Image (cartoon, rainbow, N blue to C red):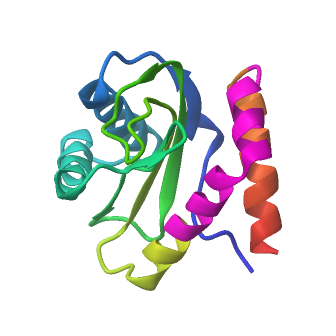
Amino acid sequence: MTALFTLLPEAVGTIRADDKHAILQLLAERFASVYTLDPHEVLERIQERERLGSTGFGRGVAIPHARIDGLARPVAVFLRLEAPVAFDAADGMPVDLVFGLLSPEQAGAAHLHALASISRLMRDEQMHQSLSEAPGAEALYGLLCNVIDRDAA
């Protein structure tokens, strides 16, 4: 079995952002550069979804997601923030871990399965702590890939 989404090494990193808009902007730019997408379209689709309700998941995590044309399968970006930022999360807590997901427009169940997988991963207290404490992008990517690969098996 293959992973539910693609996460490339260059799609993982630590950023500095001052507000929710800046986070979404940086997320869209990362998606665009890593997966060769139009940054404006990505931002527009993510913001469109965000207007339906905050993707602030709780416990310092946000999972911005959207469907977009031009993808063959779901793709992800993971960003750790240098400092927590208000994100209108369900629990009112600021976020410092952002796991973005884009899926093909017609992904249907594949999009929901990928979101559920990310949600389970981010609810795991030990994983949450490991991601918060990882020394850099390479360590973050290694942690995420170990779980993604394990869950795909």
Q: Going by the image, does 53 lie left or right of 55?
A: left
In the picture as drawn, the residue positioned furthest to the front comes out as 91
Q: Nearer the viewer, residue 111 or 59?
A: 59
Instruction: Assign the magenta stretch its main secondary structure.
Output: helix
Picture quadrant of residue 102: bottom left
Measuring from the top left, give residue 120's x and y in whole percent.
Answer: 64, 62
Residue 56 place in picture, x, y as percent: 39, 45
Q: Residue at x 32, y 80 (%)?
A: 106
Q: Relative to 124, is 7 on the left or the right?
A: left
Magenta range: 115-135
Q: Nearer the viewer, residue 66 or 131?
A: 131
| Residue pictured at 82% horizontal, 65% vertical | 150
- How far from the left and from the top, in percent, is residue 100? 45, 48
Q: Position of residue 99 (x, y in %)?
A: 51, 46
Taking the magenta stretch, the answer to whether it contains residue 134 is: yes
Write the residue at 82% across / 52% down. 146
Please check the rendered image and state whether residue 94 is part of the magenta-colored stretch, yes or no.
no
Image quadrant holding the C terminus, namely bottom right
* Figure quadrant of the N terminus: bottom right
Query: Which residue appears at 46% of the width and 75% of the height?
Result: 112
With respect to residue 99, does 139 lie above or below? above
